Amino acid sequence: MTNLRDSLNEKTMLLKVSAGDWEEAVVIGGQLLVDVGAVEPRYIDAIIRFTREYGPYYVIAPGLAMPHARPEDGVLETCFSLVTLKEPVEFGNKNNDPVDVLIFLSAVDNTSHIEAIKQVVTLFSNQQNFEKIRKAAHYSEVLELLEEMGATENITN
Amino acid sequence: MLKIVAVCGHGLGSSLVLKMTLDNVITEMGINALLETTSVTEATGALLNCDIIVTTEELAKLIDAPTGKPLVTVKNLLNVEEVGKKIYDAVKAHYPREISK
């Protein structure tokens, strides 16, 4: 599974949900990956443990987190899930807090998800796209955006 | 050719994002560089064999950069202006001959 559009669907997206703190947000998105069989439940514990140990190493841009642990922490399939929050939460990353968009990653190795990560970068480095995701109330809006991106990719390639 | 290594917690998430942002800016700036990714725990060997280390502000404190080797820290890994300017400044300061434009 190397394409973001292969991972993101009705089952792997929860939009405009409430989370009391970063840990709750991580559990929500992690559970989506558990439910589709992409990770074992211990994957969620690993993310939380690493966050406490290293700090929020996966908060990559203002408002955006990409929580993940290692392949050996219970990954069964390379997959992504998307969670957006009604109210942003603090991860303790002074530059990029607060976070309201979380794209969760489970990777079976160091390379299988590279194409999908490229799409994550393309998607969120464009502020207009970022805002569309942030404001999306229904998963179909995100899918439409991904389809549009795919169409653009085909034209430019 | 310069070797730039992007470091993150596990070597498969943030460092890949950083590598892709770098990919998008270095050629444009006239910097000819090989980009690699690694994790904080595996970093020691990679750090010895590279010319520039790039990471997040969060992780920089966990990295023991070899003496004299530039350690570039970025805040927003998706921001081409920030990442581009910081890497350009580091190359200009430490390896000015590697800039072809």
Image (cartoon, rainbow, N blue to C red):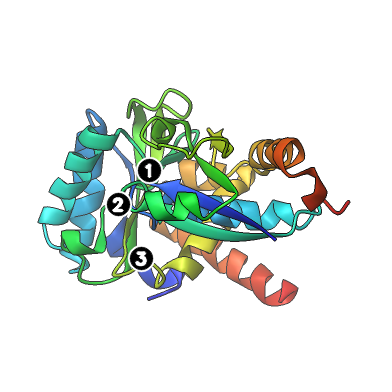
At 41% from the left and 70% from the top, the residue drawn is: A111
Residue A58 shows which numbered tag?
1
- Say whether mark 3 and mark 2 are on the same chain: yes
- Percent coordinates x, y for residue B87 in the rendering: 67, 41
At 41% from the left and 36% from the top, the residue drawn is: B64
Q: Earlier in the sequence, mark 3 or mark 1?
A: 3
Mark 2–mark 1 CB contact (< 8 Å): yes
Q: Is residue A55 above or below residue A154?
A: above
Classed neighbour count for the residue bearing mark 1: other residues with Cα under 10 Å, few (<14), some (14–19), many (≥20): many
Q: Say which of A130 and A47 sits in front.
A: A47
- Percent coordinates x, y for residue B52 in the rendering: 59, 46
The type of residue carrying mark 2 is His
- Percent coordinates x, y for residue A36 in the rendering: 20, 67
Q: Residue furthest top?
A: A94
Tell me, yes or no, if residue A138 can be seen here. Answer: no
At 53% from the left and 52% from the top, the residue drawn is: B5
The type of residue carrying mark 3 is Asn
- Say whether mark 1 and mark 2 are on the same chain: yes
The type of residue carrying mark 1 is Tyr
Mark 2–mark 3 CB contact (< 8 Å): no
Q: Residue furthest right?
A: B101
Q: Say which of A62 and A112 sits in front.
A: A112
At 74% from the left and 59% from the top, the residue drawn is: B32
**Residue A24 left/right relative to A79:** left
**Residue B39 left/right relative to B70:** left
Mark 3, residue position: A9
Q: Earlier in the sequence, mark 2 or mark 1?
A: 1
Mark 2, residue position: A68
Q: Is residue A92 above or below residue A75?
A: above
